[in-house]
């Protein structure tokens, strides 16, 4: 037995096992997909189905029978958005789609990432109207349709799905558009390419080093298209299946290299959407950045102590906008704050194009992957009561409210935010009522309308966090609950990683509050702390964030509208080298973050904390 364990080439066995699991998973996902039956609608008279709108990509023609079958399926299943997968979708795109489809893609979960084939979308007229899509819009490219699906799902978060349309034709794949399609699906092309090339290299190494087991793994990879898509009765029958199976290693290598070339071309020069913003940023920066900062204060905004020391000085490593920011720490209470803090003009400048505009897709992608965290936040209240009306302060696009309905289906969720995104959240139906403005300014009109108020990663962004707590105390009735989540400035990794610790998040985070300070501030306002969570609130971003910020620092984007707008060949090459070298670092960092998250959960020592407090009747009556 010992001899057997010693001689088994475990690397090749692991590759073989991974391929086997992936093959079975793809077959299961394909088998779970509903298949339209156009034949049952072939004799029906051609109609334009009332209440529905079809959007097809350029070069895709949906016949009447398929359209009627799609409408019948959506009506029967209660879907408002249906992505149609061509039955003859080419092999590599079919395999790629099966790899990234949600396990229940026939009907996506409320917070699941929506990814489809990018060929045709059937959407309910109500969704089209709320999303402000013109009925006579020109046919989009496939990449644009991928983007549209992800945007539209926000308007029907629990009523979006996919189905196979056997009669739907699929245009020939175009490697020049592949990188754009990957980006539109929220899949970074460089990471996809790196994983493909790494997988091929691993297979070659397994064959050369491990012999038999390596050959078995290579054979399974080679035959995978036929094993997944070639079974009798398969609803996906690519026309190129035989060729794609016979020449798979070569075709995969060529496709990866062509995608890499198209991705490089797309990112190696200025983009129209960036150039369009440049005149506005140039005009602002000509006046200098001094007006973006207020005078430095000499005392702690939390306790008033003058015992201050510099904790951190750092540039904008997130967007690369001009400016340098200082975080100071109070020696008396440990409060960490931005000093000098941003002025109102500064806040407008540094927030711009981060959550909206240029940054909207990236922000939506990050927030869209946090469903489990949102539900855990909402579930924290379960042992202490059932909320009837919940106000989420700093809600943004309302991702928390949308997810929290899974925990509290009978609760009314409203959102408040200073950005216009909260109006979009209301249009999507993610919040019941949108309150647009500053919480302290609106608090007087919200008194006792809610029995739960949440502030998740909100206080650290505010100018006066104590004033925000005063507003919460005014709004909540006796017995009402306040839920807060914040980054923890006492986290050890904050000191180890220094300026590359992502939760410092400069220049946006103006206050980082130790939990002891927050407890006392809540007690002063008539709250009783009921529960705290540290490990459960940990966000798995420390090491991946450090790689990201380091890469941004070494090679910022030269074509950003606040940047120089030009780049020499050497500078472009350096940026390419830095971000290519970062790819394996991301893999290692992700593994370290996974270990760090497990340790945080076991030791209650993460990079963030959650706190639940109840407004006490006695304090309310005294007020």
Image: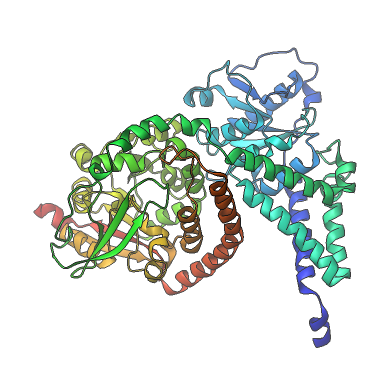
Q: Nearer the viewer, residue 564 or 455?
A: 564
Q: In the image, what residue occupies the spot 48% across and 34% down?
A: 274
Could you say where residue 119 lies in the image, as x and y percent from the top left? 69, 30
Q: In the displayed structure, would residue 565 be above or below residue 256?
A: above
For residue 105, side relative to residue 152 (left or right): right
Q: Nearer the viewer, residue 70 or 119?
A: 119
Could you say where residue 10 lies in the image, as x and y percent from the top left? 77, 73
Could you say where residue 431 lies in the image, as x and y percent from the top left? 39, 37
Q: Nearer the viewer, residue 463 or 109?
A: 463
Q: In the image, what residue occupies the spot 20% across and 64% down?
A: 520
Please say which color scheme the image uses. rainbow
For residue 219, side relative to residue 25 (left or right): right
Quarter residue 149 falls in: top right
Q: In the image, what residue occupies the spot 76% across and 41% down?
A: 94
Q: In the displayed structure, would residue 319 be above or below residue 541?
A: above
Q: Which residue is situated farthest in the left direction here?
A: 622
For residue 154, side relative to residue 292 (left or right): right
Q: Nearer the viewer, residue 515 or 410?
A: 515
Quarter residue 200 falls in: bottom right
* Residue 611 appearing in the image: yes
Could you say where residue 136 lies in the image, as x and y percent from the top left? 58, 15
Q: How many marks?
A: 0
Q: Quadrant of the N terminus?
A: bottom right
* Residue 184 appearing in the image: no
Q: In the displayed structure, would residue 560 be above or below residue 461?
A: above
């Amino acid at each position: 037995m010992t001899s057997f364990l010693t001689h088994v080439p475990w690397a090749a066995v692991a590759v073989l096992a991974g391929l086997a699991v992936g093959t079975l998973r793809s077959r299961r996902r394909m088998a779970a997909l509903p298949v339209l039956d156009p034949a049952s609608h072939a004799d029906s008279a051609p109609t334009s189905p009332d209440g529905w709108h079809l959007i097809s990509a350029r070069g895709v023609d949906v016949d009447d029978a398929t359209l009627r079958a799609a409408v019948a399926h959506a009506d029967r299943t209660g879907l408002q958005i249906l992505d149609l997968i061509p039955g003859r979708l080419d092999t590599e795109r079919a395999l790629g789609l099966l790899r990234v489809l949600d396990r229940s893609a026939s009907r996506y979960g409320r917070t699941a990432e929506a990814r489809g084939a990018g060929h045709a979308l059937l959407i309910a007229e109500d969704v089209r109207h709320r999303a402000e899509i013109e009925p006579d819009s020109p046919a989009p490219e496939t990449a644009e349709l991928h983007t549209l699906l992800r945007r539209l799902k926000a308007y029907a978060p629990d009523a979006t799905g996919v189905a196979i349309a056997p009669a739907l034709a699929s245009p020939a794949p175009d490697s020049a558009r592949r990188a754009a399609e990957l980006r539109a699906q929220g899949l970074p092309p460089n990471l996809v390419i790196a994983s493909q090339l790494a997988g091929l290299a691993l297979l070659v190494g397994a064959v050369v080093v491990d012999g038999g087991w390596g050959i078995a793994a290579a054979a399974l990879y080679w035959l995978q298209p036929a094993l997944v898509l070639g079974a009798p009765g398969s609803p996906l029958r690519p026309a190129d299946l035989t060729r794609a199976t016979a020449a798979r290693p070569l075709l995969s290598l060529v496709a990866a290299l062509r995608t890499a070339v198209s991705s490089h071309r797309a990112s190696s020069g200025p983009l129209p959407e960036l150039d369009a913003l440049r005149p506005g940023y140039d005009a602002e920066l000509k006046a200098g950045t001094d007006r973006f900062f207020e005078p430095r204060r000499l005392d702690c905004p939390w306790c008033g102590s003058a015992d201050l020391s510099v904790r951190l000085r750092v540039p904008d490593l997130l967007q690369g906008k001009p400016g340098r920011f200082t975080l100071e720490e109070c020696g008396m209470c440990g409060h960490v704050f931005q000093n000098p803090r941003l002025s109102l003009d500064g806040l407008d400048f540094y927030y711009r194009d981060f959550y909206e505009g240029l940054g909207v897709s990236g922000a939506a992608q990050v927030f869209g992957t946090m469903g489990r965290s949102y539900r855990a936040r909402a579930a924290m209240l379960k042992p202490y009561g059932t909320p009837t009306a919940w106000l989420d302060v700093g809600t943004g696009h309302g991702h928390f409210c949308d997810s929290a309905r899974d925990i509290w289906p009978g609760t009314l969720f409203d959102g408040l935010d200073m950005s216009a995104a909260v109006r979009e959240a209301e249009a999507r139906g993610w919040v019941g009522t949108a309150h647009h403005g500053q919480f302290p300014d609106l608090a007087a009109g919200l008194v006792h309308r809610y029995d739960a108020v949440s502030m998740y990663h909100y206080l650290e962004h505010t100018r006066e966090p104590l004033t925000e707590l005063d507003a919460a105390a005014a709004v909540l009735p006796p017995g009402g609950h306040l839920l807060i989540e914040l980054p923890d400035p006492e986290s050890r990794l904050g000191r180890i990683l220094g300026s590359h610790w992502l939760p410092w998040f400069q220049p946006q985070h103006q206050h980082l509050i130790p939990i002891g300070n927050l407890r006392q501030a809540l007690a002063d306002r008539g709250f009783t702390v009921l529960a705290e969570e540290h490990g459960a609130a940990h966000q798995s971003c420390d090491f991946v964030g450090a790689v990201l910020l380091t890469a941004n620092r070494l090679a910022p984007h030269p074509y950003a509208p606040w940047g120089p707008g030009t780049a020499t060949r050497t500078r472009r090459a350096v940026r390419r080298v830095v971000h290519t070298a970062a790819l394996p670092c991301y893999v290692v960092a992700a593994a370290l973050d996974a270990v760090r998250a497990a340790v945080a959960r076991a030791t209650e020592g993460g990079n963030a904390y959650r706190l639940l407090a109840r407004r006490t009747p006695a304090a309310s009556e005294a007020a």
